[in-house]
Structure formats: C-alpha cells, structure tokens
Image: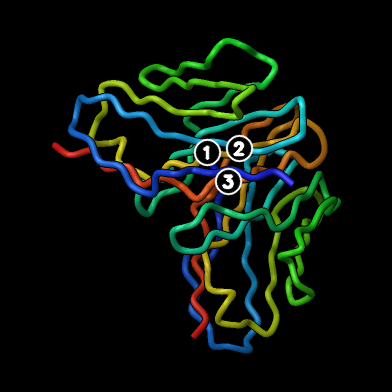
C-alpha cells in the first residue's frame, strides 16, 4: 500500500517570503503521479501542481514549483513571493498510474501567510 | 458555475438515522470518486465509479454505506444507521477521460449527534 507523509503540521511565513512544504511517500510502483492540492478555509480543494514520475524535470506553475527526488521518494512544494491568498491547507497526494487512479493523501500542512 | 456540486452542504442527524448525499459531477466526466475527510486529516478514498460501474470500494466502506451512479450522471452516497464515527466531510470528485486531474466539489459536512 502507498503512504504519504507530510511532517510539517503547520507553517507560517510573512507575505512575499518563500516557503517550502515537505512531502515523502512510499511505494513500490514505478509509474505514478504526484500532486499538491490546496484547500482554503471553508472552500473546496483545488489542484496546485502535478508531477509525472517518469519526467525528470520538476514541474512549475507560476509561483509554485516542486522538487521531485524519485530515488529519495521526496516531493516538496516551493511557493515563491507568497501572498495572503496562499493561506490554506496543503495536501500532498499520490496516484498510481494504473487501476482506479484514486488519490492517497498526506495529513496536510496548514500554511498561514502573515501580512 | 459548471464545477462539481454536492447537496446538501451540511447535514445534522441523530445516531441511527439514514442519510443520503448527492454529487453532480462536471458534465462528461466519466469517472467519479467519493472521499471522506475527518477534521485535521487528509481525505481518504471511499469508492470509485467509471461511467455507471462501481469498480472499487475501500475497506472503510462498511456494509452500512452504499453508493450508486445511475446512467453516468449524478452519484448518491447513503449511510444507514449512522454512528458518531461517521461525522466527517464527504467529498466528491470527478475526472474527464484520459486525465488524472480530479475536480473536487465543496463537500457535505455530516454531524451525527
């Protein structure tokens, strides 16, 4: 079975700073996808960024980028120039390439951006 | 707004009652997922539909839980004889063909008293 671990329950930074959220996972699969989802307070979950395991290049979406280390089974999210609207719970998630393609989530990191 | 919708958004029920939740996926999304999220935790997979067929169920889904998706449209999740441990947010997500991105609804928050 796959597991996803987020070791930082809470983080807090000042607006405009850069912050990195950590995620490690365990799997015996060779082909899979990794995701970071954002869940703002009382709002629905939205996709931030995704990474295909077969791609060596780290994914980037505007201010969001990942550091994917396949051998270490590590998948961290970096948020540059953080904004107040980035305040949310962030979940790292794993998906096998085959089968139901269900998401396996970590416990989440509560990120607060302070003005 | 053409996103995933869920109804009701909140449900308070007494222990032992039956409840039913509805999820309307994005049009033409052929895959639909149900997850359960307890306070302070990440969502956990409950069940999955491809078109009308329920293809996988989690061990979390006891025999008190049932889900269906008639005619590749909306899905319903029913919990019979609710228990306090069923209190959680129930999330629905849908995915289009040939995609891995799951689009989540706002969830139904269930409180069992």
Tag 2 residue: A25
Question: What is the chain letter for disc 3?
Answer: A
Residue A70, horizontal then vertical, whole percent: 63, 22
Q: Are marks 3 and 2 in contact (CB under 8 Å)?
A: no
Q: Are marks 1 and 2 in contact (CB under 8 Å)?
A: yes
Residue most extreme to the left: A115
Q: Residue at x 59, y 23 (%)?
A: A51
Q: Label 2: how many residues lie within 10 Å, few (<14), some (14-19) or many (20+)?
A: many
Earlier along the polypeptide chain: callout 1 or callout 2? 2
Q: Is residue A104 left or right of residue A16?
A: right
Earlier along the polypeptide chain: callout 3 or callout 2? 2
What secondary structure is marked by label 2? Answer: strand
Q: Nearer the viewer, mark 1 or mark 2?
A: 2
Q: Nearer the viewer, mark 3 or mark 2?
A: 2
Tag 1 residue: A92
Q: Are marks 3 and 1 in contact (CB under 8 Å)?
A: yes
Earlier along the polypeptide chain: callout 3 or callout 1? 1
The reply to whether label 3 and label 1 mark residues of one chain is: yes
- For residue A88, what is the image quadrant? top left
Tag 3 residue: A105
What secondary structure is marked by label 3? Answer: strand
Type of colouring: rainbow
Q: Label 1: how many residues lie within 10 Å, few (<14), some (14-19) or many (20+)?
A: many
């Amino acid at each position: 079975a796959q597991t996803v671990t987020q070791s930082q329950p809470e983080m807090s930074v000042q607006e405009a700073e850069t912050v990195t959220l950590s995620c490690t996972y365990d799997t015996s699969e060779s082909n899979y996808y990794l995701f970071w989802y954002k869940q703002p307070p009382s709002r629905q979950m939205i996709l931030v960024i995704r990474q295909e395991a077969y791609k060596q290049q780290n994914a980037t979406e505007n201010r969001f980028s990942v550091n994917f280390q396949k051998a270490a089974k590590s998948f961290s999210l970096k948020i540059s120039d953080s904004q107040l609207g980035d305040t949310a719970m962030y979940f790292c998630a794993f998906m096998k390439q085959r089968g139901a393609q269900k998401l396996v989530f970590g416990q989440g990191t509560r990120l607060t951006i302070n003005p | 707004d053409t996103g995933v919708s869920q109804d009701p958004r909140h449900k308070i029920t007494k222990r032992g009652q039956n409840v039913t939740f509805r999820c309307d996926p994005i049009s033409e999304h052929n895959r639909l997922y149900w997850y359960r999220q307890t306070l302070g935790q990440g969502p956990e997979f409950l069940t999955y539909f491809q078109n009308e067929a329920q293809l996988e169920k989690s061990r979390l889904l006891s025999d008190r839980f049932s889900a269906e998706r008639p005619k590749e449209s909306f899905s319903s999740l029913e919990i019979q004889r609710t228990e306090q441990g069923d209190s959680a947010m129930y999330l629905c997500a849908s995915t289009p063909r040939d995609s891995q991105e799951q689009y989540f609804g706002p969830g139904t928050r269930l409180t069992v008293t």
